[in-house]
Image (cartoon, grey):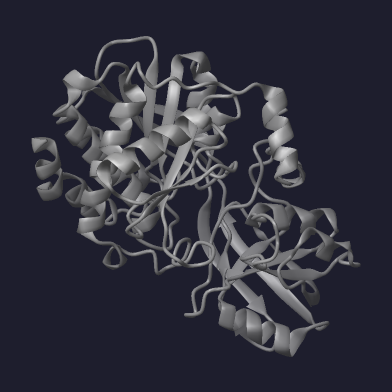
Amino acid sequence: MHWIAETFTSDTGWSHLESLVEWNRMAGSDGERAAAEATRDVLADHARNAHLREFDIQGWERGASSIEADGDHECLALPRSPAGEATGAFVDLGYGLPEDFEADLEGKIVMVASNVPSWYGRLIHRREKYYHAVEAGAAGFVFRNHIEGCLAPTGSVGTAEAPIGEIPAVGVSKEVGSTLARRFEGEELTVQVDCETPQATSQNVHAELGPDTDERVLVTSHVDAHDIAEGAMDNGAGTAMVVELARALAAREAELETKVEFVCFGAEEVGLLGSEYLAEQVDQSTIKAVLNNDGVVQGRNLTFYTHGFAGLRAAVETVGDRMGHPMEVNPQLGPHSDHWPFVVHGTPGIHVYAETGAEGRGWGHTRADTLDKLEKRDLREQAVLLTELAVALASRETELERKDEAELVERLEQEDLAEGMKITGDWPF
């Protein structure tokens, strides 16, 4: 078990994380490219055939933004908001549940919270709230953080077919949102966004270990991050984890019975573009499983979305029992990270993230997503668990069933996810 001791003392992943946070890794930027190249180079130290694969994307570059109502109020443009100005009566829709948009919102500026009430049965994604506002005829969209601390949230809008959104969209802190709701309900205000939308290029990073089998296990993360912060939690830590897993699995390569392919995707934050690109290029039947690291290290204990795949759940629980470490399973569907373009084709996929105890993203998607909030110990400890899980997924003894389209459609409808995916243009069936 020398590999455990080596992982508990390794600086490979953490050192790479310290490098990643030095770049502005917005999708399509020079910083994202530099981070991808650095990730390729570190992977090349531990795995074979490390390389980049480029793909074209719709770029988006931030300019100024403002909310004008008896003076200016601090805000951030949401990526892929169109440039422009919208003026209208201000309406606070609270949580922005689907039924809240049944009001007369034509020509109005609507504000919604970044969370949902504890009693509500599912997550309502930011983009779902945005497109409910668009369908209701709103002129502008204000996304209010539910976390205190004067932190305006970011997060993209747009769809695959129309990458730039339809109405100006900005994020505001909880405190600014409270001020707007208290002082300007029903009053006219103006939302203004300046941005550039050039064509751009992103890239996925690839490397591999193990036997040269047709079948493979994908171990993934995403390199890009929003341009307002270091992106340490989302998702520098995930890419650092992939690098650390490559180092640890190189020491156990003789145990791998299926090829393990490491893929660090580009352009996740603007629509899962890197993973969609790969999913369209590969024969999905050759992918045994996807182990997607998005949100690891931000807390000590890991949770695993297993999307109803019984074999994945069994593998996670077996590793947790063997290592004597809590590893919680969430069997529901989670369509908001880079595993999803594979799961939607019936491929067994895990989304692994760390529990923080906070509601929603916490520090994520704000200027507070910084390295000081993460612990090297957590990265090392989780790398031990995820290395063991990757070996288990690559084992011939681990049999994983695929799901057919009818079952996935039924599950999406049962979990009340279908409506939201349809309104955001993400419904794939």
In this rendering, would 45 be left or right of 101? left
Compared with 42, 295 (above or below) is below
Residue 127: x percent and y percent? 66, 53
Of 160 and 312, nearer the camera is: 312
Tell me the quadrant of the picture where the N terminus can be found: top left
Towards the viewer: 338 or 217? 217
As drawn, the residue found furthest toward the right would be 104
Query: Which quadrant holds residue 399?
Result: top left
* Residue 114, x across and y down, in percent: 61, 66
The location of residue 257, given as percent across then percent down, is 28, 16
Res 257 visible: yes
Quadrant where the C terminus lies? top right
Where does the image place residue 398, in percent across and percent down from the top left?
39, 22
> Residue at horizontal 67%, vertical 30%?
408
Q: Is residue 35 visible?
A: no
Left or right of 62 on screen, residue 231: left
Front residue (pair 126, 184): 126
Identify the residue at horizontal 12%, vertical 46% (top origin). Answer: 10
- Near-viewer residue (121 or 70): 121
What is the quadrant of residue 140 in the picture? Answer: bottom right
Residue 219 sits above or below residue 16 on the image: above
Left or right of 407 on screen, residue 49: left
In the depicted structure, whether residue 335 falls above or below residue 379: above
Counting the numbered discs, the total is 0
